[in-house]
Image (spheres, rainbow, N blue to C red):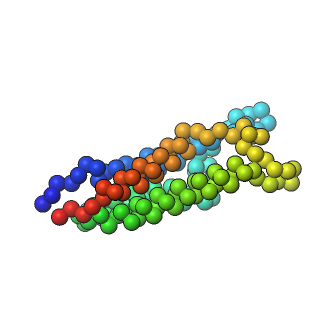
C-alpha cells in the first residue's frame, strides 16, 4: 500500500481558500460619498456558482479519498475550477467594458471600483486547485 502524497491536498486547500475568500470583500466602490464593500455572497446571482464550485471540489476530493480513488476527483476539480474562473473572468471583463443604464454607460472608474483581496484570493484559490489537480491519483 502506497502512502498518500502530501501534494494530493493542494486541490482541496485551494478550494477551501476560494470558499473562504468568497465571503471576504471582492470589490470596493464609492457611491454618494460613501465607500462600500461587497463580497461574492453580496453580489449573489451567478456568483454563487463560484462558491458551489469550491464546495464541489472539496466534496469530490473527500468522497473519493474515502474510497481510496482520489484520482477520480481530478475531472470534477478541473471542470469546477474552469467554470468558477470562467464566471469570474467573464463578469470582470463584462463590467470593465461598461454597463449600459438609462443615464449612459457606467465604467468602473466612474464609481471608484477597486478589486479587493477576497476576489483575488478566490481567483488564486481556484488556480491553486487547478494546479493541484495534477497531483490527484488513486492510491493502490
Apparent side of residue 120 relative to residue 72 in the rendered image (left or right): right
Rendered location of residue 64, percent (x, y):
30, 64
Residue at the (65%, 52%) spot, across then down: 93
Residue at the (47%, 46%) spot, across then down: 124
Apparent side of residue 31 relative to residue 49 in the rendered image (left or right): right
Residue at the (59%, 43%) spot, across then down: 26
Residue at the (79%, 47%) spot, across then down: 106
Rendered location of residue 12, percent (x, y):
37, 53
Rendered location of residue 101, percent (x, y):
82, 53
Compare residues 140 and 29 and report the one nearer the observer: 140
Question: Quick check: 137 above or below 122?
Answer: below
Report which quarter residue 59 is drawn in. Answer: bottom left
Q: Residue furthest right?
A: 103
Apparent side of residue 101 relative to residue 55 in the rendered image (left or right): right
Can you see residue 52? no
Q: Tally the marks.
A: 0
Picture quarter with the C terminus: bottom left
Apparent side of residue 29 relative to residue 6 in the rendered image (left or right): right
Q: Residue furthest top?
A: 33
Can you see residue 133? yes
Q: Residue furthest left?
A: 1
Question: Quick check: 116 above or below 82?
Answer: above
Rendered location of residue 109, percent (x, y):
74, 40
Question: Quick check: 114 above or below 65?
Answer: above
Picture quarter with the N terminus: bottom left
Amino acid at each position: 500500500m502506497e502512502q498518500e502524497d502530501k501534494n494530493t491536498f493542494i486541490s482541496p486547500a485551494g478550494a477551501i481558500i476560494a470558499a473562504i475568500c468568497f465571503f471576504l470583500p471582492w470589490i470596493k466602490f464609492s457611491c454618494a460619498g460613501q465607500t462600500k464593500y461587497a463580497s461574492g455572497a453580496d453580489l449573489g446571482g451567478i456568483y454563487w456558482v463560484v462558491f458551489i464550485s469550491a464546495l464541489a471540489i472539496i466534496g469530490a476530493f473527500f468522497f473519493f479519498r474515502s474510497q481510496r480513488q482520489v484520482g477520480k476527483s481530478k475531472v470534477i476539480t478541473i471542470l469546477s475550477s474552469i467554470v468558477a474562473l470562467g464566471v469570474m473572468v467573464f463578469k470582470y471583463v463584462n463590467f470593465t467594458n461598461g454597463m449600459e443604464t438609462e443615464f449612459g454607460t457606467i465604467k468602473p472608474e466612474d464609481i471608484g471600483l477597486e478589486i479587493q483581496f477576497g476576489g483575488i484570493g478566490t481567483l488564486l484559490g481556484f488556480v491553486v486547485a487547478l494546479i493541484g489537480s495534477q497531483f490527484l491519483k488513486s492510491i493502490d
